[in-house]
Amino acid sequence: MRRQNVIGLVVAKLRFERKWTQEILAARVQCQGVDVSRDMLANIESGRTKVTDEQVVGLQRAFGVRIILLFPKAVQELDEKFAERENVRPLKRHRQRKP
C-alpha cells in the first residue's frame, strides 16, 4: 500500500519522543481548534489517510515546532537547499486595491 502522506512517521516519532499517547496528542490538536480523533491520528501516523492543511497546522502548534520539522529529513534538506539559492527572493505580497 502506498502511503497517503509524508508526515505520518515523523508525527509518530515526535509523539513517541514526548511520551504522549495518541489520545494526548489528539487532545492537544483539538485544543488548537482542529477536529482530530485518536483514530484519525492513528491513520495519519500509519499513512492510511491524507492530511489536511488544517491538521498540519494543528500538529505543528501541538508539538510547538516549525512546520518543516513535521516533514522527513529529505524534504527538510531540499527546503534548506532551496533557501540557500542566491536567486530565491521572498514572495511579494500584493496589496488589495481599495474600491
Image (tube, grey):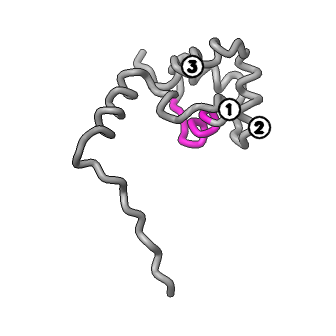
Dominant secondary structure, magenta = helix
Mark 3 and mark 1 in contact? Answer it, CB < 8 Å: no
CA–CA distance in space, label 3 to label 1: 15 Å
Residue 78 appears in which quarter of the rendering?
A: top left
Left or right, 53 with respect to 87, comes to right
Mark 2 and mark 1 in contact? Answer it, CB < 8 Å: yes
SS at mark 2? loop
**Amino acid residing under circle 2:** Cys
Q: Identify the mark at residue 8; answer none if there is no mark.
A: none
Q: Within the magenta stretch, is there residue 53? A: yes
Start-end of magenta stretch: 50-60
Residue position for label 3 = 45
Q: Identify the mark at residue 31; answer none if there is no mark.
A: 2
Q: Residues within 10 Å of mark 2 (few under 14, many from 20)?
A: some
Q: Residues within 10 Å of mark 1 (few under 14, many from 20)?
A: some
Q: Earlier in the sequence, mark 2 or mark 3?
A: 2
**Amino acid residing under circle 3:** Glu
SS at mark 1? helix
